Amino acid sequence: MSAVVKFLSLILYALLSCTIQAQQNREMQICKDEMHLSCGEVQKHKLLHSFEANPRTQNYDVIYQRLELEMDPSVLYIKGKVTVHFIPREDNFRKIYFDLSRALSVIHATRKADSLSHYFEDSLTLAIELNESLKAGMADSISIEYEGVPQSEGFGSFVKSDHGGVPILWTLSEPYGARSWWPCKQDLTDKIDSLDVLVSCPAGFRTASNGILLSETLQSGRNICHWRHRYPIAAYLVGIALTNYETFTDSVILESGSKMAIVNYVYPESLSAVRTQAFDVVEVMQLFNRLFGDYPFAREQYGQAQFGWSGGIEHQTMSFVGAFPYELLAHELAHQWFGNRITCGSWEDIWLNEGFATYLSGLCYQYLRPEWWKLFLAQRMERVTHEPGGTLKVDDTESISRIFNNRLSYAKGGMVLHMLRWILGDTAFFNGIRSYLNDPQLQYGYARTTDLQRNLEQASGRSLSWFFEDWYEGEGYPVYDLSWSQDNKGVTIKLQQTSAHPSDRFFEIPLPLGIYGRGRDSILVLDQNIREQEFFFPLDWEVDSVAIDPDQWIITKVNTIRKIPVSTSNPGKVNSCTFWPTPSQGILHYARQDDTGPVEIRLFNAMGTVVFSTWLYSENGSLDLRDLPKGMYVLRGSNKEIRFAEKIVMQ
């Protein structure tokens, strides 16, 4: 970047940073809380064990679960009955397994009022023997009664805390913690088709959970809250929080024209402060509805519940948040589309959850708060390029810190989506994302990165294998060395690319280049396909400076930009070669008026790409250009002594 452009960029960055510090407290929290969000999501997984789908739970499908729970926020304990409706995938189905921590005691297991034998095969797997064999496809159900003190995994699978001296009990199961507090099928292969959650707690307390609150009944000094959810849901997205909540409701008009409730469960001491902040999610939802289609659970509602952790978790239809800053609310709401409607089918692909949520929170700035958009991009780019290594694909799913790596799964994931948008253009990009969300093979199910690639390719008509090889499986990012010069014909650009990573990968990303001078500016696109490449662009105004990727589309760090003065030696020999006819039908004749030795010839198309090159050794001859398409070209020739440029038209 030129000294002038770099200086102006630094001034802009400083002004934006100062502006952030000058905002009221709510706006001051935007960047700070988003960073805490990502760091907190890393923290909450540090103590969890590595996850693989339990192979013993893969021979049946869960179609319905009913959780009937007794809980008291002042006591770390749970007592419950879980009824499971399931369909075997194989004949002679006689034993069913569930993910459940042995820290909990199973009191009864029943089927059609008959008691069933049950035992733990290991510390995390409950086995129940049925009283008859079932055939594949034969729907059935059992009930499990259990109780005990859950051993909370990580930073929140089952936690008792307090706020303002009042107790609160909450769950945070992502990705492995559901088994610590209820018998479930905890994997990334099968979703619960339908769910009911009934929580009985002491009077004076209320429960927030998934779906809609069907009823709230006071019986014998206990408050029974019945939540109903009728969309497929992954086990880790089932959540419960109970304390002395106050509630208030906003509403949003969907793209379909219908009205939907947004309900907020808030600590009484936070109520007045949160009312204004929570309303921000209305405009955010309207933006997401417009870009990606209506909220995925529109037949029910969306909710936000305050809980005792500093970040947030995207429980389906009811996000839990520690506070209500703008970007945190946008991030968790975005997960309802990306993470909940479609859930990553492997922790290798966690970026399909977190990368999308990160980028969508940035889109809120672009479309709703544009003064923050450039700063958002600059911060994410800086975060990604802070270190050279690391693939977007999680290469070690046994490492929780690697799965939820902020630099890779969050920032790089978001900026890879940004680059896809640059390459495809807004129309193909957003059409492809909507196609991904509505793919009948994926919606309300699980997806892998190849599923996203397939939908983007279908929407754009372009192969993206090269892109995902570079940016999903590859490490590093491109570093550019650019030199440029200008004569009366236009601007010549020489571009050299190296990799920031020792793997030395070449990135075939089209590079935007800003050119500036005399109150004018333009964006050129350098479609680089070799490490060292020369481009020429006809230009009739004087350029003062150039800047690589001025709008921050590409993950890169620029090393060098240099202006090369045009040589004025041998001025009488500049136009030392004549070409005819022009326009040409494909055979271009030439005659030289110099004796300076071989001359290198390069022909540039309108995009500045070299489409033909050769050497002229004789005084007269012809060039066969019949394979080139019709259009305008610039022919440039040079050696150590001479240089020339001519416009050539092919008919």
Image: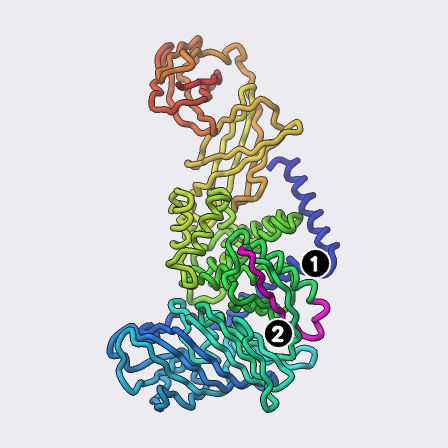
Residue at 50%, 76% in the rendered image:
153
Q: Give above or below for 233 relative to 327.
A: below
Q: Is residue 208 magenta?
A: no
Where's residue 454, x and y in %?
38, 50
Report the span colored magenta. Answer: 256-274
Where's residue 207, x and y in %?
58, 78
Q: Give above or below for 28 relative to 1.
A: below
Q: What is the crowding at mark 2: few (fewer than 14 residues within 10 Å), some, or many (at least 20)?
A: many
Instruction: Determine the secondary structure under disc 2.
Output: loop
Residue at 34%, 89% in the rendered image:
116
Identify the image quadrant of the N terminus: top right
Where's residue 492, x and y in %?
52, 26
Residue situated in front as seen by the camera: 498 or 586: 586
Q: Is residue 264 magenta?
A: yes
The residue that mark 2 highlights is 308
Residue situated in front as seen by the camera: 215 or 182: 215
Q: Earlier in the sequence, mark 2 or mark 1?
A: 1
The residue that mark 1 highlights is 28
Q: Residue furthest front?
A: 257
Left/right of residue 15 with respect to residue 435 in the rendered view:
right
Kind of residue at disc 1: Met
Which circle marks residue 58 in the picture? none
In the rendered image, which quarter is residue 246 located in? Answer: bottom right
